[in-house]
Image: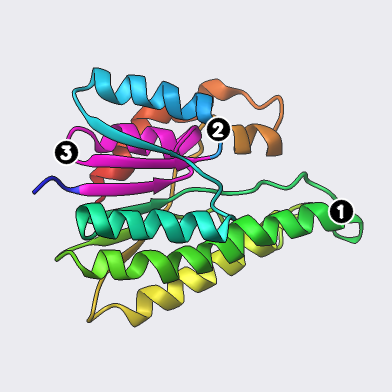
Amino acid sequence: MTRLALVTGASRGLGAAIAEALTPDYHVLAVARTVGGLEDLDDRIKARGGQVTLAPLDVTDDGAMQHLCRSIHERWGGLDLWVHTAIYAAPLTPTNMVEGKSWDSSLAVNVEATRRLITYVSPLLQAREGARAVFLNDDRAGSPFFGCYGATKAAQMALVRSWQAETVRTGPDVKILEPEPAPTAVRARFFPGEDKSVLANILDEGQRLVSLL
């Protein structure tokens, strides 16, 4: 049976690099809003001899996520791996100037979508022996000007760590990985003008993270 990996937030950055690194060992189900990025990923994966199914969906769309997970169940019966990299990086700002739209988007993507996906994806993982869920940590809580991102990323990790503790005996195996600094769009938004030559190569970092599984 072909192993199936769901990658949410797969169109660019570490999500795309991880999705590419998973092939050809996994059939990758790539989820993201950016169609162009998914099509580029499709080309790269097929060039490696891998298989990919593109799902241009918004992780904050409850109906779309329900339909996606129901379709996975009906077509494949379960998942071997879920890698969640979808994130909203709010602009850096003093905490007393965080505006409502950035806060609402951060909560919707970083917290609520994660909670919802854990609910929907966990039965798919439990249907496969040895299945794993993977999340990427980026601890900015308490850092100056990171109030919006730092708070919602910390809330996401709190959900994940609770799920991790709850599933030690029952599965799935929930892993939290620590990426090395790499030239992603999120990092460029936080650190514009940073010397990218000192950062990890994005594809190499994707391979490294997959090797930890």
- Taking the magenta stretch, the answer to whether it contains residue 176 is no
Element on which disc 1 rests: loop
Between 61 and 9, the residue placed more toward the observer is 61
Element on which disc 2 rests: loop
- Taking the magenta stretch, the answer to whether it contains residue 20 is yes
The number of callouts visible is 3
Mark pair 1, 2: CA separation: 29 Å
Quarter of the figure with residue 97:
bottom right
Could you tell which of marks 3 and 1 lies nearer the N-terminus? 3
Could you tell which of marks 1 and 2 lies nearer the N-terminus? 2
Q: Give the image location of residue 3, x and y in percent.
A: 17, 48
Three-letter amino acid code at disc 3? Asp
Residue at 71% x, 62% y: name it: 142
Mark 2 surroundings: few (<14), some (14-19) or many (≥20) residues within 10 A: some
Between 32 and 18, the residue placed more toward the observer is 32
Q: Which residue is mark 2?
A: 34
Q: Nearer the viewer, mark 3 or mark 2?
A: 2
Does any portion of residue 34 appear in the rendered image? yes
Three-letter amino acid code at disc 1? Pro
Q: Give the image location of residue 17, x and y in percent.
A: 39, 33
Q: Nearer the viewer, mark 1 or mark 2?
A: 2
Could you tell which of marks 3 and 2 lies nearer the N-terminus? 3
**Answer yes or no: do the residues labelled 1 and 2 have beta carbons within 8 Å?**
no
Q: Which residue is mark 1?
A: 94
Mark 3 surroundings: few (<14), some (14-19) or many (≥20) residues within 10 A: some
Does any portion of residue 176 appear in the rendered image? no
Residue at 59% x, 55% y: name it: 60
- Residue 135 vertical position relative to residue 199 in the rendered view, above or below: below
* Region of the chain picked out in magenta, as a range: 4-32
Three-letter amino acid code at disc 2? Thr
Q: Which residue is mark 3?
A: 25
